[in-house]
Amino acid sequence: MAAVLETLETVKSVDVDAYKYGFVTDIESDRAPKGLNEDIVRFISAKKNEPSWLTEWRLDAYRRWLTMEEPTWARVDYPKIDYQDLYYYAAPKSMSGPKSLDEVDPELLRTYEKLGIPLREREVLAGVQGARVAVDAVFDSVSVATTFREELAKSGVIFCPISEAVHSHPDLVKKYLGSVVPVTDNYFASLNSAVFSDGSFVYIPPGVRCPMELSTYFRINEQNTGQFERTLIIADKGSYVSYLEGCTAPKRDENQLHAAVVELIAHDDAEIKYSTVQNWYPGDSEGRGGIYNFVTKRGDCRGANSKISWTQVETGSAITWKYPSCILRGDNSRGEFYSIAISNGRQQVDSGTKMLHLGKNTTSRIISKGISAGRSSNTYRGQVFAHRKASGARNFTNCDSLLIGNACGAHTVPYVESRNSSAQFEHEATTSKISEDQLFYCMQRGLSAEEATALIVNGFVRDVLQQLPMEFAVEAQKLIAVSLEGSVG
Amino acid sequence: MLEIRNLHAEIDGKKILNGLTLSVPAGEVAAIMGPNGSGKSTLSYIVAGRSDYTVTAGEVLLNGEDILKLPPHERAARGLFLAFQYPVEIPGVTTHTFLRTAMNAQRKTRGEEELKTADFIKIMRAAADKLSISQEMLRRPLNVGFSGGEKKRLEVLQMTLLEPRFGILDETDSGLDIDALRVVSDGVNALRSKERGFLVITHYQRLLDYIKPDSVHVMSNGRIIKSGGPDLALELEKHGYRDIVANAA
Ligand SMILES: Nc1ncnc2c1ncn2[C@@H]1O[C@H](COP(=O)(O)OP(=O)(O)OP(=O)(O)O)[C@@H](O)[C@H]1O
Ligand SMILES: [Mg+2]
């Protein structure tokens, strides 16, 4: 409830077109030469001192990528990307690899401070609410700091940059990397496999409930630089982890490419809860600049009774192309997808999920809330599939769209396919507008038009907000208000 | 306190108010009665600032200030409250959250401090108890699935919490059972004071037995066609509107 009030505060304090995280950090960086070829792939691999199997794995991905076509089926429209006009690697010069926090460039620490992300554990502990969250901070292509590692290590949890896990836990990386999203999965996933720079690695041992929230904050700073991070999370038998990802980028007039891959693996009786608050720079109200967000996220419920849930709050990016999915392989496994996708200005969102029911008695639940304002376009694209052997599979899908104004568009594209007659799929969809009656009623009680809109929208997305960890729900609520700036009147 | 002078208004090219004049001094309760469709709710919407109506002439003064140019929330912050004939549902927003948001929004516009959570809860509980509104109801989304009478009681709860300078009640009595009518009237009477004024729109004398008006006005075709004391309501109850409307035409 306090969050609603904060939402209102935020609405008041922000100007139209003001993206709070749009500052640029002036920091010297080490970049690979522009363009993409086998030498660049080798350069990145060499920078990370990688074993040869991984260099080969990257090269294989690169060669396959060359034979692929950029997908065009999504309802998004953007000028052709010149992949040779981008930098594929950028690292703050002062940091050649993760070190202790004391050695981190103070300019970087200040950047994360400005973003409200505490990297100093002492400060986290001194926080008002005392909520402890371990953070991995990724700046352009490298991880600059990971907090609470020692404490996590006590319970056997591994939380570190993936570039480091390649060296410290090569067996785990080799076993799981690409096992959920294969190198040939899709155009952007192949590109990521060839040039991925860093990202987080998480392993939770059998029977362990991770003692704190884990989170990664991604920040793109450099100009003309693609960001290709790779996240790999493995929850071994009977374990549990809750993970949050947050992203921001400076305001720049040109578009920036972000093509990440996230792979989750849940073994028998394990549970992974993955939450995202995506706030990449969306571009200005005329559609200049902003991030192209082409992301492949997939979870594999590999074991029986395993569970994976995706919760996402998507407010940023000029273009979003993203379908966090679950492969329900283990019997009785469960997949969940809770999404709030907000588009304003000229943003284009094509997002949704896939629930692939392979095992027996697998269940899935999809709750999607799309909010379109300004001249944006917002598409939900979802697939629910039951394999011949997936007897007793069940899915419930609820897909609601809310329109603000008359110049935006909302679309729902569900694909449903069942090869097992005992599978039960349910689908509900609604489209509504914020009514004049609702706005007037709120305003008669003292709320401004913007406060009223934020309140009504927060009500609309309540079911999903409740799925987020407490602190992040507050953050998400503020974000919703900010991203709807200028959408009324 | 509330001065409406020669008000003309239309919507979608249709004239609804035709030179309405009405004055309610501070400390008084004025009742408006009139046939269906005479423009009573329209009048309340225009005074509260609903934007889809066009005012073509006239003025509305609240405490001497012309409020027609102000957006609805600024009128609210100046102490104007409208209890709606048809309260609106807001899915997903709990009644509790809505009440607190509204109170603090008004405080903020007036440059006052926000209410502390504990204080808010205390004030809200006490006010809800007086109106026989359960705590369970306050946890539900605003007006969603509330019965007609529950919605009306909630309007009066909001008025009690927001402590307006001037309250307009649009058929707050319709849909109330006999006990609720008394509870709600007590709630309104508790707010009556020398500084406050009320405009009560109703079809029934019954409400005016509980909330005793200082003046009664008959509205027809977008104008006040007759004004008088409390007796006028009794007369209307007996004879209906026909003669008065015919005389005015
Ligand atoms: N958007 C609109 N377009 C056209 N006519 C409208 C519109 N809104 C209201 N009206 C008309 O204006 C007239 C006055 O309506 P209003 O709701 O103010 O009446 P009322 O006196 O409150 O009636 P009741 O006693 O039934 O509540 C009615 O004839 C109504 O149909
Ligand atoms: Mg009416």
Image: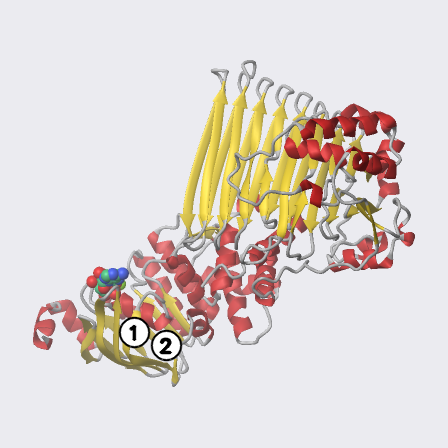
Toward the top, the furthest residue is A389
Q: Locate residue A188, reporting x and y percent.
A: 66, 35
Q: Residue at x 76, y 45 (%)?
A: A34
* Amino acid bearing label 2: Leu
Q: Residues within 10 Å of mark 2 (few under 14, many from 20)?
A: some
Q: Nearer the viewer, residue A379 or A484?
A: A379
Number of the label disc, if any, that sits on residue B177: none
Q: Quadrant of the N terminus of chain A?
A: bottom right
Q: Residue at x 77, y 42 (%)?
A: A212
Q: Locate residue A273, reporting x and y percent.
A: 67, 36
Q: Quadrant of ligand 1?
A: bottom left
Q: Of helix, strand and loop, which one carries label 2?
A: loop
The residue indicated by pointer 2 is B68
* Amino acid bearing label 1: Val
Q: Residue at x 23, y 77 (%)?
A: B20
Distance from Cα at disc 2 to Cα at disc 1:
8 Å
Mark 2 or mark 1: name the one nearer the start of the chain: 1
Number of the label disc, if any, that sits on residue B55: 1
Q: Is residue B236 left or right of residue B214?
A: left
Q: Locate residue A441, reporting x and y percent.
A: 41, 62
Q: Chain of mark 1?
A: B
Q: Residues within 10 Å of mark 1 (few under 14, many from 20)?
A: some
| Contact check, label 2 and label 1, Cβ < 8 Å | yes
Q: Is residue A78 visible?
A: yes
- Is residue A75 placed above or below A123 in the rendered structure? above
- Is residue B20 placed above or below B180 in the rendered structure? below
